[in-house]
Every structure is written in C-alpha cells, then in structure tokens.
Amino acid sequence: MKKYSYLIIGGGIAANAAISGVRKKDATGSIGVLTDEPYRPYSRPLLSKGLWKNTSEEKLWFSNDEKNVDILTDHMVVKIDPASHSVMTSTGEIFNYNTLLIATGTMTRELPFEDKEIIYYRDYASYLKLKALSEKKSEFAVVGAGFIGSEIAAALAMNGKKVVLIESGAGIGWRVFPSEIVSYLNEYYASHHVQVLTGVTIEDIKLVDDRHHILFGSGKILDVDGVVAGVGVKANSGLAEVAGLAVGDGVKVNSYLETSVPDIFAAGDVAAFHSPALDKIIRVEHEDNAVSMGTIAGENMAGGNLEYDYIPMFYSDLFDIGYEAVGTIDARLDIFVNWEETFKKGVIYYCQDGFIKGVLLWNEWGKVDQARELIREQKWIDKNHLKGLIA
C-alpha cells in the first residue's frame, strides 16, 4: 500500500495540468498518477489534428521528469473509498491519498451494431489502429459529423483516402453552426473529395471478409475498408457516483473544483461546474478548459483558494478553414452572422434574450479575449449593434 499527498486518476490534459498546479504550491509533496492506458499522459487533440499532418509524434507526450511524479500506467481504478482516503485498482492494489483528483474524462458512445472493428476514435490506441489501417487501405466511412468526425474525415481525405461522411442531421456541425455554414461546409467537404451523406439512418454495420457493409434505412449498402465513429461521448463519472459523490452530467464541483466529498476534486471533461458568465451548469470537452481547470484544481489540492470562473474556448481545423469558439455555441440560440468575407472570415454571435452567450471566430485570430469579455459583461445589446463589435 502506497500513500501520496496528491493522487490523480486519469492520464489526459487535465491530469497533466494538475501536476503543474500542485507544483506551483508544493515543490516536494508526493504525486501519483493512475492511468488505465499503457501510455504516459499525452495531448489528445493532436490525435485528430497535427499527427495527420506533419507534427512529430514526440509532440504528443507530456514530460514531467523534473516534477518528481510517479506515473503508473495500466492502473485501472475500480473503487474510490472516501472514508479511508484510498482507491483500489483492478489488480487489487490500494493507494492512499491526502487529496484526490478525478480527471477521468469521457467515454465514447457506441453504435448498436455487431461489427467489432468499428474504430471509436478517442485515444492513442484508436489513432494507432486507424493510422495502420489507412496505410494499407483506401476507402473509409466516418459516422458522425460533429467535432471529431469532421476532423477525422478531413484528415483521411488530406492523406489521399476516399471518405464518406455519414450524418443523420443536416450536415457538418449542424448542432452548433448556423444553417448557412452547415450548407457551406457540406459543399466545401465535397469539393475536397469527401462525400457527405446527410439526413440518413444506418440500420446495420457488419464485417464480412475484411470489408464493412453499411446498410442504410433506405436499403442502400455502402462497402468500405474501415469505419470510424464519432457519435458523441458521456462523462466517465461511474467511479464517482458509486463512491457517493454528487453527479449529474458529470461530477459536480463547486467554484473551487471541490466535489461534494471532502478532499476530492474533479477537473476536465468529467467535471460539471457553474459558469457565472453563462449562468448555468456546464461540462466542457475541450483542451482549453482541461488545461485551465486542471491547473486550478492542482493548486487548490495543495492549499490554494482559487475560484474557477473561466470562460473556455475551443478550436478546430477543417482542411484550410480554422475557427475558435468561446462560450455557448448552440444552433438553437439566436444567431447573428457578421461576415467580413462571406464564408472566408467573420464573427458569429450566439445570443439569448439580447445577451451574448457565445462567439464563433471564423478564420479570425487573436480575438478570443475580446469575445470572452463581451460574454463576461452580460450587457443587453441590440442586434443591430453587433456588427463590428469585435474588429
């Protein structure tokens, strides 16, 4: 049995940031990281972005050599016991802690089909599997045109693969983008040799002789070499729930990132927190939030007293298009589009009852802080005055 001053469950961005946060306050306290993967902590965003371009795989891995941290790979935590300040792994090992951070991220949602070779794209293992397959095969289907699906479809196409992007909704990013951008992206992907199928349902996917047979509700069949699914995720909060922590859509935390149980914190994709600026409970599945939240959680684990009132941002690259988004980006809000050059460069405002809740910066760079300030102010703004607000 080993005891750590600071014990972290998870091996992603939030876990890595928490290490730095702890070390800001405590240079010598023992830190242990338990990750169920066979790899040390790494940066997941590169899996669907840079690694498919020219980014070296060396950039993937976080280095904590100088921080005196025990990184324990292949350690799956199966139980948290708050009463004894301990956790147990799948092999029966017990680790005690003074303070604990839950940074377990999310779990992929899976399709209800018998094909066991569908690649649910989420971690380094799934990247390796898809990369190896793409080096041997040429025809791929990507199911889901959200963040992950749209990035992977672009990545495969840029690597010379024939890609079909399958979406049950109106098109690429339809849950977050205004309809005019969705239509534009559908056409843009088609011009980059990605066939986009919208408004379709899949009845079944079967693996037959190394080919995936996709049966659509219309009766049509598509045969491909590989299927990648990006159909959403859910918070990996089961451990916390069984341990008696308050959960909802994620592990609930207060403004100091403390859970409902003393000495246990949560951060990153798994944590649900109240955003003062947006005035609601949110859970954010993006890099910027994981870094900021993990850092503050680490500092507070080590005796800090910092409140988390950050407004996270996220970004994506789709072929030659890049965007950054701040706040709530939801197509159900009132959307006002301000193009400097139609579909090439502009600012899109997401409003509710006259208040700005989110900003999408379309090929606009260096303006995230302006967007954050507008959201944080929460001043009522006439829609006719939105034009040029961010310039």
Image: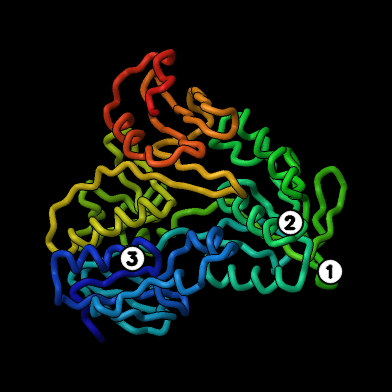
Mark 1, secondary structure of its residue? strand
Q: Residues within 10 Å of mark 3 (few under 14, many from 20)?
A: many
CA gap, disc 3 to disc 2? 33 Å
Q: Which residue is mark 1?
A: 208
Q: Is residue 237 above or below residue 134?
A: above
Which of disc 1 and disc 2 is earlier in sequence?
2
Look at the image and tell me in which quarter the C terminus lies: top left
Q: Residue at x 78, y 61 (%)?
A: 139
Along the horizontal axis of the image, is 11 left or right of 56? left
Confirm whether residue 263 shows in the render: yes
Which of disc 2 and disc 3 is earlier in sequence?
3
Along the horizontal axis of the image, is 113 left or right of 327? right
Question: Residue 15: which disc?
Answer: 3
CA gap, disc 3 to disc 1? 40 Å
Along the horizontal axis of the image, is 55 left or right of 387? right
- Give the x, y percent position of residue 209: 85, 72
Q: Is residue 99 above or below residue 305?
A: below
CA gap, disc 2 to disc 1? 15 Å
Q: Is residue 117 above or below residue 169?
A: below
Q: Closer to the observer: label 2 or label 1?
A: 2
- Give the x, y percent position of residue 341: 56, 28
Q: Which residue is mark 2?
A: 141
Q: Residue at x 73, y 61 (%)?
A: 160
Q: Residue at x 44, y 46 (%)?
A: 314
Q: Nearer the viewer, residue 203 or 147?
A: 147
